[in-house]
Amino acid sequence: MLLGNLLLAAAFQVGPFYQQRPAEDAAALRPFWSCEGETTDVLWPLFTSHRDWWRFLFFTHYQSNDKGYQFDLMPFFWCGASPDPYWGLFPLWGSHPHFLLMHDLDFALWPVWMRYSMPRPQEKRMMTTNSVLWPFVHWRDDGSWGVWPLYVCNRHRESWHQTALWPIVTWASYEADRDTAGAGSSWMLWPLFGGVSREREDQWLFLPPFFSLANVWSASRSESAMEPEMRLRCPWPFIEFEATVRRERLSIWPIYERVELKSYGAEDGGLRAQDSRVMRIGWKLVELYDDETRVFPFWVSRKDDSYFRLWPFWESAEGRDGVRRGRFLSLFPIRHVPAVDRNWAKFWTFYENARAADHTDHSLFWGIIRWRTDRD
């Protein structure tokens, strides 16, 4: 039986360098090449391809589908068709149908001239912005315009936001709406004072953004009444306290933070609370969740035993197939990074096991020694 395992290991794995797993449609010649399903890596992160796209050093990217193609050599050159052709040579001239958050981007001698569109979901339309000598002069098709930093007037949903000698003087007027704090106004003389007076919000700011007290009235859990909420910063970012419909939070940065999130789910035709809590110590070095404990990067443990890490020695996780897989060593401190597992993790993984319901398979020194133990 041992000889059979040795022959099987020799056929499918040679140390950490070569591995083939036909059942998972995976193979690797580390660190030069690996393939798993539709993903292929060559000297990752140098080159990666996946079905209809490939990427080189995160700067060069190509993608094709039934709607067209796209090639990027960012940030200097790009071309494509989706379905109409487009191209760009930054900063001389270019167009792009969707770059970052901008749609139908056009520019010439950037930043001399630029035009782009942004979605306005509430209005179910696209808003077009023109800019000359960005970010100094702009105008939009909703009436917004500005000569920054002297004067800017922008429309945002049901409100007008204006600044003069930004950021020294800012003020806004709000119309009645459903989703925010209602009609009213706000102002700020930075860095001294500021205030907000709206139907469902009152706020005072002193030496903004360091000291502020905000009171907001939001829909309650039953949505039949308004509940008061408050936020205190004294001073920000060191001390913050929030008590809202959706969460309660106390932060003494960077020493301590406690957050209680409030949400709801259906149960027996009604509603029940599904609150979750997290406590952080030392900013995010220690995080205590209801279902998980983290001490970055040394310790992660889930209460349902589906994941455990003692860095840099041991890591185990339960897969979708119900099999729990563990390995020693586990040097990479971030979990669930498939590219690292495919191309590099084997070099420091000397022992692995896979625990099924009735047995555990063991692999030592990259499969050179294998054995199985039955579980009672």
Image (cartoon, grey):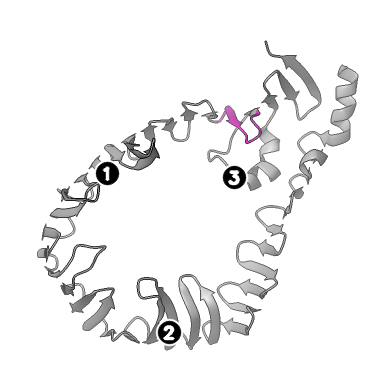
Residue 216: in sight, yes or no? yes
- Estimate the x, y position of residue 12 in percent, counting from the top left: 85, 35
Q: Residues within 10 Å of mark 1 (few under 14, many from 20)?
A: some
Q: Which mark is residue 111?
A: 2
Count of numbered circles on the image: 3
Look at discs 1 and 2 and give the one toward the viewer.
1
Marks 1 and 3 close (CB-CB < 8 Å): no
Amino acid type, callout 2? Pro
Amino acid type, callout 1? Arg
Q: Secondary structure at mark 1?
A: strand
Is residue 217 positioned above or below 317 on the image? below
Pick whichever, 147 or 156, lies toward us: 156
C-alpha distance separating marks 1 and 3: 31 Å
C-alpha distance separating marks 1 and 2: 42 Å
Look at discs 1 and 3 and give the one toward the viewer.
1
Pick whichever, 272 or 108, lies toward us: 272
Amino acid type, callout 3? Val
- Estimate the x, y position of residue 98 in percent, counting from the top left: 52, 75
Q: Identify the image quadrant of residue 123.
A: bottom left
Q: Residues within 10 Å of mark 3 (few under 14, many from 20)?
A: few
- Image quarter of the N terminus: top right
Q: Residues within 10 Å of mark 2 (few under 14, many from 20)?
A: some
Is residue 151 positioned above or below 204 on the image? below
Q: Going 39% across and 35% down the picture, which residue do you hit? A: 268
Residue bearing mark 3: 337
Left or right? Give the position of 352 relative to 367: left
C-alpha distance separating marks 2 and 3: 38 Å
Marks 1 and 2 close (CB-CB < 8 Å): no
Left or right? Give the position of 131 relative to 165: right
Identify the magenta region: 312-323
- Estimate the x, y position of residue 262 in percent, counting from the top left: 30, 41
